[in-house]
Image: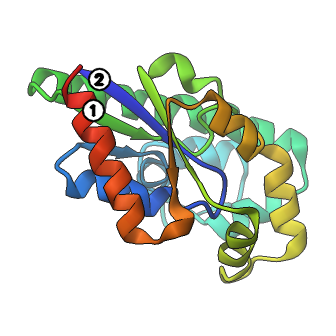
Amino acid sequence: MIILGLTGSIGMGKSTTARMFAEEGVPVHDSDAAVHRLYAGDAAKGMEELFPGTVIDGVVDRNKLGQRVIGNPEALRKLENYIHPLVRQDADAFVERHRKAGAELVVLDIPLLFETGGTDRVDRIAVVSAPADIQRQRVLARPGMTEEKFAAILAKQVPDEEKRQRADYVIDSGKGLDHARDQVRQIVKELAQL
């Protein structure tokens, strides 16, 4: 079984591209969705111990948590040290389930693949990328996003150019959905031949 790591900086179209892989019949593990599940379940108790007052009715309130960690590097480090291993366990269980089921290819959608040292977990890497002006337009259109937040997020991410250089595949999401979908299909076809 081949494990394809899918990543890309904020606003590059990674989530949309992940759905395209799923539409091609490839099992996809979404790290962001795993965090949401964990925040509403197994991780809530630990989060309340780490950040008292951030759990409401057994679910982590992402806004309250954000107020505690954004702009606070020590708090952010505590959060990441707690949640990243849980997400990794969730992904490992996903991979094992699909390995046992005989899947030939799975995708791990990992936003911070390079930043968290996750490259050792995958056999190939696909980076979703778009021109900087398109990225900026997409991100600033998000509710609650500001120039300052965008700059802070970018500062924490490996630059897009470096991600593209380190990738086995680069999916250009700046040329429309059909173009991206064609690239996804080509990657699936190539990996099926390995």
Depth check, front residue: 92 or 142? 142
* Corner quadrant of residue 113: top right
Q: Residue furthest top?
A: 120
Looking at the rendered structure, which numbered label has been put on residue 177?
none
Apparent side of residue 92 relative to residue 11 in the rendered image (left or right): left
- Would you identify the image quadrant in which residue 71 lies? bottom right
Judged from the image, the secondary structure of the residue bearing numbered disc 2 is strand
Q: Position of residue 54 (x, y in %)?
A: 67, 60
Identified by mark 1, the residue type is Glu
Report the residue marked by disc 1.
190
Tell me which amino acid carries mark 2.
Answer: Ile
Quadrant assignment for the N terminus: top left
- The front one of 41 and 12 is 12
Q: Which residue is mark 2?
A: 2
Q: Position of residue 116 (x, y in %)?
A: 66, 29
Viewer can see residue 142: yes
Pointer 1 or 2: first along the chain:
2
Residue at the spot x=23%, y=43% of the render?
27
What is the CA distance from the residue labelled 1 to the residue labelled 2? Answer: 11 Å
Kindly state the secondary structure of the residue where label 1 is placed. helix
Quarter the C terminus occupies = top left
Neighbour class for label 2 at 10 Å: few (<14), some, many (≥20)? some
From the viewer's perspective, is residue 5 above or below residue 53?
A: above
**Residue at point 72%, 53% (across, down):** 52
Query: Which mark's residue is nearer the viewer, 1 or 2?
Result: 1
